[in-house]
Image (cartoon, coloured by chain):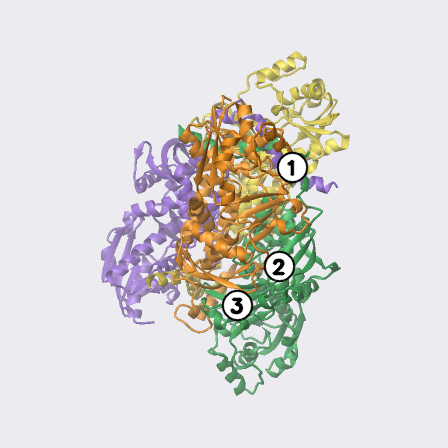
Chain colours: A yellow, B purple, C green, D orange
Amino acid sequence: MSKINKVVLAYSGGLDTSAIIPWLKENYDCEVVAFVADVGQGEEELVGIEEKAIASGASACYIADLKEEMVKDYIYPSLKTGAIYEGKYLLGTSMARPIIAKAQVECALEIGADALCHGCTGKGNDQVRFEGAFAALAPQLTVIAPWREWNLRSREALLDYLAERNIPCTASLEKIYSRDANAWHVSTEGGVLENTWNAPNELCWVWTKDPQQAPDVAETVSVLVEKGEVVAVDGKPMTPYNALHYLNGKGIEHGIGRIDIVENRLVGIKSRGCYETPGGTIMMEALRAVEQLVLDKESFEFRQTIGLKASHLIYDGRWFTPLCQSLLAAANTLAQDVTGEVVIQLYKGQATVTQKRSLNSLYSEEFATFGEDDVYDHSHAGGFIRLYSLASRIRALNSQK
Amino acid sequence: MSKINKVVLAYSGGLDTSAIIPWLKENYDCEVVAFVADVGQGEEELVGIEEKAIASGASACYIADLKEEMVKDYIYPSLKTGAIYEGKYLLGTSMARPIIAKAQVECALEIGADALCHGCTGKGNDQVRFEGAFAALAPQLTVIAPWREWNLRSREALLDYLAERNIPCTASLEKIYSRDANAWHVSTEGGVLENTWNAPNELCWVWTKDPQQAPDVAETVSVLVEKGEVVAVDGKPMTPYNALHYLNGKGIEHGIGRIDIVENRLVGIKSRGCYETPGGTIMMEALRAVEQLVLDKESFEFRQTIGLKASHLIYDGRWFTPLCQSLLAAANTLAQDVTGEVVIQLYKGQATVTQKRSLNSLYSEEFATFGEDDVYDHSHAGGFIRLYSLASRIRALNSQK
Amino acid sequence: MSKINKVVLAYSGGLDTSAIIPWLKENYDCEVVAFVADVGQGEEELVGIEEKAIASGASACYIADLKEEMVKDYIYPSLKTGAIYEGKYLLGTSMARPIIAKAQVECALEIGADALCHGCTGKGNDQVRFEGAFAALAPQLTVIAPWREWNLRSREALLDYLAERNIPCTASLEKIYSRDANAWHVSTEGGVLENTWNAPNELCWVWTKDPQQAPDVAETVSVLVEKGEVVAVDGKPMTPYNALHYLNGKGIEHGIGRIDIVENRLVGIKSRGCYETPGGTIMMEALRAVEQLVLDKESFEFRQTIGLKASHLIYDGRWFTPLCQSLLAAANTLAQDVTGEVVIQLYKGQATVTQKRSLNSLYSEEFATFGEDDVYDHSHAGGFIRLYSLASRIRALNSQK
Amino acid sequence: MSKINKVVLAYSGGLDTSAIIPWLKENYDCEVVAFVADVGQGEEELVGIEEKAIASGASACYIADLKEEMVKDYIYPSLKTGAIYEGKYLLGTSMARPIIAKAQVECALEIGADALCHGCTGKGNDQVRFEGAFAALAPQLTVIAPWREWNLRSREALLDYLAERNIPCTASLEKIYSRDANAWHVSTEGGVLENTWNAPNELCWVWTKDPQQAPDVAETVSVLVEKGEVVAVDGKPMTPYNALHYLNGKGIEHGIGRIDIVENRLVGIKSRGCYETPGGTIMMEALRAVEQLVLDKESFEFRQTIGLKASHLIYDGRWFTPLCQSLLAAANTLAQDVTGEVVIQLYKGQATVTQKRSLNSLYSEEFATFGEDDVYDHSHAGGFIRLYSLASRIRALNSQK
């Protein structure tokens, strides 16, 4: 491996990436540039982050606002597929990784860096997602994953490491829960969750109100969907990020979108996490409800098949692959008819679609009820059933011979 | 078609099948035997049903108690597949039809009948489910579907028809909602539901408390799962039907298991229904939670694939086919490890698994956390990622040539 | 049903559609316009066809040359999916039906007809394909399917029917085999094939040489594929139809592309057919060979999944549905890299790819052999395997507890 | 890692495993036991193998005859799934690995060994298959993979290594092609095949006659299939292995079962191989032909889905997983009806089924032809088509509003 001169680090301002900066300089004898992706993780995580990076030894710190792009180009396409990992998880961390990695690569190429670095641990999915994106976008750049290299194995060791170098750090020794947040969701792992027989406690939930503390009166929100994308909420046209932000506000208040799951990580182990996706859960319900109106039986089934497959590709860090793009294209084609309006009731943890309509609706009051109409004749059913069950009939007749 | 001498009618005691008895006798000049399946639709529907059948002109009325068999041999195998139709519907009506049809066929063969009759309408799924089962089990018997033959087109016409023949009937002229109930669920169609822009009102829900009226205090229930089947609840071993019955009681109280869906019928049209599956929803959550612990990533995905496919086969009346049996065999094989215990919190419409454990759990606190262990070495991940993303890397290198 | 004034008939010039013209006029009291689709069925079938239609009573006869469009817009997109019905059948008749139906509808709309008619029998797939297309493209037009209406049940009856009306007809009484041809394939049904225990005889094959009579010397042909489409053959750029025509010539000479299959028709019965797809078989081999070079493992598997699903949609007459379009979009996305060149050896019934190359090839001599390289390090495999089999390891450790 | 005392090596008698014996002793200071699996690789590979192992330093050499078990318990179940990897490869090496690994583990457990060793290279699939089986069957045993550890990187180095130790070895320096053989197939890699633009030459084929040199006269063979398994050939009942052996003889003579493929290895790279599966190709054709007769449309499609999925699991070394067992169970259930007889013509590289019959056949001459019958009424088709295309009709009517 040739000498590294400049490395771009995906920098969060937390303890791990703060320690990585001096570690890289010492171990690779190189310039370190901090790259911060604003994916909606919250103002408090971004305030003073540039100063912090410089204080840790970075030669520069770039901050990229990716919020609108993330919702528009990563979350919305994913939503059209209906991807939900292992039946529960709305892929909040998974969808954020490719956009961060892509922006990081662009930064590296622009400033002529020869390496990329991330602070993901060696047991998690995120290392695969970052490095999968790096391999697809900039295979010529070297990848450094300190957690797989260094001997620092605890928060205490990291704090000591920084203290020895007089690098200021506000991180505390005690950090029970590991968290990841962006505009779409916040995740919590560790602490009591490590035993699956423990129920989550209040520290396991960050954004959303406990459903039992949520308002006693239900609230409704209306969502306008166009070609599979949320374009307006409560009558107001909104950009993708703004729609998500607005729905997050509603969802948080009513305790919407909490899940507690033991999931299969890509690296062969299981882990448990609590995820909160308040606005996203509402969006997902809205899309699925319009699909109920416009997708025929076989299309609906295929959309589910796509969603199942896409959930793995997205979770597994396969965003920048022809296969993932193929699935997104399939889902986008099906979504061309998914236009309509839904009203969703929010109440103590549940988002329930109560009203839905669409100009493309295949539902027709006239057809569905049991009277006569021009399109459907009762007698058609006789022939249909006969042919539909013909193989069963012949098989049974055979067996009676 | 040769002369029919004796027909066995799937008889419910309702207006439709009451009218079918005299209609069959008049139009086919045959003996009519009423067959009643007790699938847990409720005592009130069974009281006096034999007398009613005889009063309508049936020569005999047989009642078969299928409750335990239905849960054990139809619902439990289906649950192992995870089948949920179009992402929402727990298949309550669909799973009941094959067992009713099978018992009806057995009755017909035993008493030497030469025809089978059902009271399903010509626009619904149930006609296909009944006749699909008939074709597979007794293709030699003639099938009569009065709703596809007669000219009676309204409740009024049916009432008149009975009145003209002096057949007593307690049915009222007004019946806004069409319902179907068994031990697993109750469904409601019609009335305000016919317009998808109407929210369901209180008449659309039969069993379950409105979540907003449900207790303000959450309750928990514990479920023991063995090889994919619920074997005990709250510490008490129970038969399948008893477990379901017990969980129904809990679920009803807390408003669990309501769904409002526009679904694709098999016959090409969409319809809207409100379904209540209180105990079933709890059972489903319990099984899925144990699966989270014991199924590896690829097995979990395949279980989801099986569930998707099985949902269509079951909905579409394909129970008695080699294909459905093949899927059930696949699901049963995967379920051999699905043994464990879960605690579920019931609160205002939601059943939330809060605790789960299994001796077969692939989750390990030791592996999942970020420390060292014998089984997982951080350095393994580097090689894994390299090979995992190798195709992406080569593709990207190609494109840079 | 309102009075029909003008009907457009999909006219082939054969016995059936010749009889349909007078039958429509007599039974519907309407004007009949003959529509002939030239899909490459052969000059001999088109010579004098307009005169024949007029002589049979048609008011006009339109002939549309659809050959190039069929290959470009129906066959090429299908080939990208890899669709092969039930593992064998290259969908020659299936792919031709939607384009014929679409052109027929366009003709009907242009001349203001109010009905569409086809000569497909009531037991076949083609009626479903035609009427499926009609429903999607012109649901307002009435569809007439004489074979499901009239009482003419044999060739003799049809000949008598024409003779009684003094309509000239060159069809003979004896016609043992039923055939369908277009640029892509010719099919043969009936005769000795009706017993599956009979081997096909020489009358069952129309275009291709018997492999045993084919040249004793192998011949090679080279095919250039670009983005999943054949763009040149033997070094010469060719339009889609010309490429197919050229490859048909080669394939016919060497007995390529014969299959003998018992297949499941959409209408619930099985039928047996002999199909010859000489050029198409070569094209298919060429595409699949380039895919071997450029598609990664997961993409290849998904392409196979798409192909399996598409084979049913195309066979089942679902071309003009959002679902089919979604699959075609997915396949087309994957095909963007499918560019390369192959050499195919033709010998006594077999088309065997012997050489292949692609600038997008993920195969690399350097990587595949067992020496060292920069991209692949033997030691990576250890970590990969460890994580890859981690769930198995944990499961086994559990079971030893 | 604790000290290893006794290791069981999967020993072939070839150059690699001959060198591994002394290498293990020197590097692990342990006893080495050679384990030889007879999976039908041929007598010449087994003659004197025990002596050779002892001469190389093994303390003992065990030979297990796995031929019959391999065909019966690994190949036959796989055949029922229809697994063919990437559309071409009949999985000959893949299916042999789990049975070898299982017998090796059993040997190790019996003799109290504490480690397992194989001679697979670090770029191949077989290391994953062996170690995947080891992880599932004996996770407590240490695995040693010399090719990922040592610095010997060429045949020359290995020969020198043996010469230095005075270990006799008949291997030559020149070995252009790498081969693997068992009762089912022989594979060839390397040499001219490393450039995909080279056609295979005569050295690339080991067993089968060149089709161009095969007999000019076709031969037929008849195969009896019962519940998806070949039970008799040419009228003679045979054990699974004997049936395969017999059909190999026929297939070799006629050049049957050659394929030349660039495939995706599990470890992320592509490789090219020539495979010869003469008897297996004939068996596969026989099974698929009986399936044509007995599987209905949806079952056939699901069997194809199972086959696609199983091809990956088997190729990827996942035999001993619940998922693979689940797929085998599904396939076995479908195979219960797959009973029948086929006649196959062998001619210059092609195995073509010409005759087939089954008592379970859903094909019926009566139904398939265009006359009248009791089971199928032409008029049924009208209703079928109407409902089948109803969603298209409604969608089209919507779009015209």
In the picture, measured across the screen, residue B107 lies left or right of residue A297, that is: left
**SS for dot 1:** helix
**Residue D123 numbered tag:** none
Q: CA distance from mark 2 to mark 3?
A: 33 Å
Q: Tell me whether circle 1 and circle 3 mark residues in contact (CB < 8 Å).
A: no
Residue that label 2 marks = C351
Q: Chain of mark 2?
A: C
**Would residue A226 be seen by someone viewing this image from the given angle?**
no
Q: Quick one: label 3, few (<14), some, or many (20+) residues within 10 Å?
A: many
- Nearer the viewer's eye, disc 1 or disc 3? 3
Q: CA distance from mark 1 to mark 3?
A: 48 Å
Residue that label 3 marks = C127
Q: Quick one: label 2, few (<14), some, or many (20+) residues within 10 Å?
A: many
Q: Tell me whether circle 1 and circle 2 mark residues in contact (CB < 8 Å).
A: no
Residue B388, given in percent of the width and then of the height, sits at 60, 36
Residue that label 1 marks = A70
Q: Chain of mark 1?
A: A
Q: Quick one: label 1, few (<14), some, or many (20+) residues within 10 Å?
A: many
Residue type beneath disc 2: Ala
Q: Are marks 1 and 2 on the same chain?
A: no
**SS for dot 2:** strand
Residue type beneath disc 3: Gln
Instruction: In the rendered view, tell whether residue D382 sits above or below residue D302.
Output: below
In the picture, measured across the screen, residue B217 lies left or right of residue B387, that is: left
